[in-house]
Amino acid sequence: SDVCSSDLALGDLDVVMEKAGEDPMRDAQALAVAAMSLDRLGRPGESRERLRAAMALFTPQMLDKAEVTPKEIESWHDWLMARILVREAMAMLPPGQPRQQ
């Protein structure tokens, strides 16, 4: 069920977030997945809070550009995964629009 898998995801993400601040792109990935999981659990306020935190880890150029330069980010594959997850969360959670259950 969605609720069960979302609860499990949040538990796993707690482990990742214990090291928050060490790797901004890993943090963005975890926050984006947390946002989607919280939305599934019917917790829209917390969900949007996590999405805003994930988005704050990107400069506008990092979220919009098709490519980044090595000066902007050390690990392009982590940036790409984070960008995909953040964009997916943004698509699922339009600002101010709670998801219909």
Image (tube, helix red, strand yellow):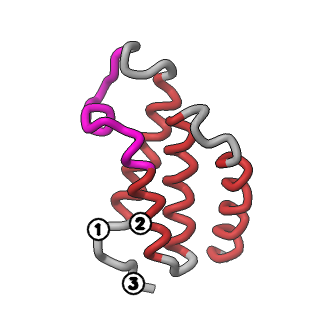
Q: Which mark is residue 95?
A: 1
Which residue is denoted by mark 3 in the rendering? 100
Question: SS class of the residue under badge 1?
Answer: loop
User: Is the C terminus in the top left, top right, bottom left or bottom right quadrant?
Assistant: bottom left
Q: Where is residue 70 shown, x and y percent of the image? A: 40, 13
- Which residue does the image show at 49% across and 38% down from the upper left? 81
Element type at marker 3?
loop
Q: Residue at x 30, y 67 (%)?
A: 94
Cα distance in 3D space between marks 3 and 1: 14 Å
Which mark sits nearer the N-terminus, 1 or 2?
Answer: 2
Residue 84: which numbered mark, if any? none
Vertical relation: 53 (above or below) 73: below
Residue at disc 2, secondary structure:
helix
Q: Residue at x 50, y 62 (%)?
A: 35
| Quadrant placement of the N terminus | bottom right
Q: Residues within 10 Å of mark 3 (few under 14, many from 20)?
A: few
Residue at image mark 2: 48
